[in-house]
Amino acid sequence: MQDLFPHPWLVNTLLDEGYIAQKREALGKAALPYSLGTWLEQHFNVAALSIRSEAQLEEKFIGPLLKQLGWVSVTQEPLIVQGKQAKPDWCLLLHPNQDHALMASKDHTLVTAICESKAWSKTLDTGKADRNHNPHHQLQDYLSTLRVRFGFLTNGRVWRIYDTDKVTAKKTYIQFDLEAICALEPGQEKAQALALFAFFFGRDTYVPPTTAGASNAIEQAIAASADFTLAVEENLKAVIYGYAGEDSLFEIMGRAIHRANPKASMASVYENSVVLLFRLLFVVYFEDKNRELLARHPFYNRYSLEQIYQTLPSKPGPRSGLHDGVYALKQLFEMLDEGAEDIDIPLFNGGLFDPQRAALLLQPKIFDNTTLRAILEKLLYKTHRGTTLFDTRRDFKNMSVTHLGRIYEGLLEFRFEKASEAAVYLEYETTATRGKSVEAYFDAYDSAILRKEKGFRALREISVKKGDVYLKSASNSRKTSASYYTPPSLSQPLVQAAMQQALTAASAQGKALMDLKILDNACGSGHFLVEALGTLTDLALERLETDADLQQLVATESAKIAEQLQFLNLDYVPEDAQILKRALLKRCIFGVDLNPFAVELARLSLWMDSFIFGTPLSFIEHHVQHGNALMGASVQEFIDYNATEVRQNDLFVDNLSARFDELRSVMDELDAMRDTTAQEVEQSKRLWKTSIAPKLQLLSRALSFICTRRALLAEGNKAACEALDKTPDLLAQLFDEAKTKTAALRQVEAYAQRFHFFHYEVAFP
């Protein structure tokens, strides 16, 4: 079984953990190159190295180690590219004759990698945006200026490798604790650790192959890791939907929820299953991403999802049919929703774990231990045609949030149905399919006909009994293309160009970065919004040293977060980038989608991307909303209607602009809240519920009246439109705060529910 926690000498945010484990094992079987083990035994003396200055450390250890690893190096060589100068500690070259060529020509293309070295006790990444005093940012600047893909960062005892091939807001690197590796007892782990270190920092890994167009070893490793991750993600997709020989995790959930709630509609069962799946995804992502922090937490691991999984029986036994596992799961959800200050666990809140969001899950004994074990096992480990591969644990922390969104977005194509007759789900091949498998549902009659086709071979059959709940898409299959997904190669340049253009325009108008409003009016899983938030965060980091407003924001939020973390006995300091991203989400990011579950998924993606342990999930219900972005009206259109059709000086219309201004001011007040503490989140929710939602409802109803008229005319129902116009005291009814529903109001609300009118001025004033 794959290790639950990574080795303490390795921190990896660059490659898939499963791939790293395979690579480590393969490298450990070969002879250690560069005589690295012997050399380190002779030269890695902690007592001697720790008292040396930075210059002495470079001269006596770092430089000689780079040489031992096969590199030709040039130190402190000033290079200029497009007017920008960089002077890294080490320019690493592949061939002996290249050092003189570099010094003579200043040709930066000769550099294969850059190594930046610091003093033994220097922290490699302070988490601050200060580019002059944070080694991480210094190296990133050198790599960007000199257009070098690979960079090493070290203080002698800790070594990092960076790959800057793909632009990402996430810090991606592999970090080795060389001190911890050298302290290991001789054996397999030490041999594998040194082999892995030699691979990533050794010169031979970066030598171009003799075959034209081929990749070197480091490029092959990165590509293989990407393929490994893709295979795991595709398997997760197959497990959720139940194709390619896998049992549907989502269907297992739906059937169990329906059994516990037999009177619930299929739509309600679907909705509750989606919420449960989203909760599990968030928790497993959170626990994986924060493994090191949670390992130090004195209490969380007693209640964690991982602990629940580990305590569930793996084989049939006395506890298999009991329900203590789901009881523990409900306790975990409740703890995350409300927090548990006595054991230093902060509340997450935000609405994701609100019990009323999925009331069917409150029923007792929804999942027995066997069923819950099956659900969590499929979520945590890769499978192959129904068999769990315990040696390949899913590396959620290194999965892209947008990739996970792509997988879960496919749920929007599906629904639960109750079988009206017996059916069978077939995965099969025939002569006509030419070796490709096909999957679909068939009734008994069609199944019998299909089995007579030439070359028919059933790869898998799933029987569906009459009355069973089963998962089905419009295509009558469990496969989904999730074709809404836009690959990063397209989305990243689009987002970056749009953001830069918007920021330039805002600066020209004297607006601050925090005043930007970024909207995706068909947000789906939130892919573009996550990209935009990351890009905006990077832009904010670049400006932090010169932007007094951003500095004040980070200082204020850091102080509040530090107070929260101190109260909860959490010993860590969030990075400036994390603090900025969380604040920018609440202030700048907006989304709309016609599918309500896409809205939930977009919120989930944004929460996963911006969450800081110790702070609540931001209240973003008012920023990512459900509606039809193509059907809405403006305040001016309503005023024009009154002027041309009603022709009366109505008090309500006179006050419409004032009402709109009032709504805008309250929304600004809501956006100004950072939701850093539980009290601020509750204040946000209270402000939304008491001051904003009622005003929003009245103004939205007035504008929906304009849309209803349009819809009636578009349907050719002119008489109904005229009858609506002649409604006595129509304007008074539209703005009546009483609960009375007249015929006109019922008609407007019926059309609003049918078409999901969305009014930008009201929703995002």
Image (cartoon, grey):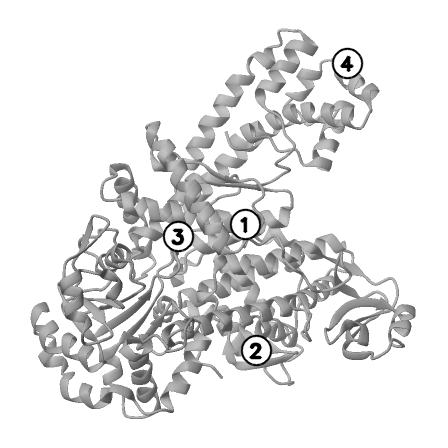
User: How far across and how far down the image is residue 272, in percent?
Assistant: 66, 56
Please name the amino acid that badge 1 sits on: Ala
Judged from the image, the secondary structure of the residue bearing numbered disc 1 is helix
Left or right: residue 444 versus residue 136 is: right
- Give left or right: position of 107 versus 468: left
Distance Cα–Cα, label 4 vs label 3: 53 Å
Q: Nearer the viewer, residue 692 or 611?
A: 611
Disc on the earlier residue, 4 or 2: 2
For discs 2 and 1, the disc positioned in front in the rendered view: 1
Q: Nearer the viewer, mark 4 or mark 2?
A: 4
Secondary element under disc 3, as helix, strand or loop, is loop
Residue of label 3: 615
- Which residue corresponds to the image point at 74% horizontal and 28% vertical from the top-left? 711
Which kind of residue does numbered mark 2 sit on?
Answer: Leu
Among the 4 quarters of the image, the one containing residue 327: bottom right
Label 3 packing within 10 angstroms: few (<14), some (14-19), many (20+): many
| Residue for badge 4 | 726
Q: Position of residue 704 (x, y in %)?
A: 67, 27
Q: Which amino acid type is marked by label 4?
A: Lys
Q: Which residue is mark 1?
A: 602
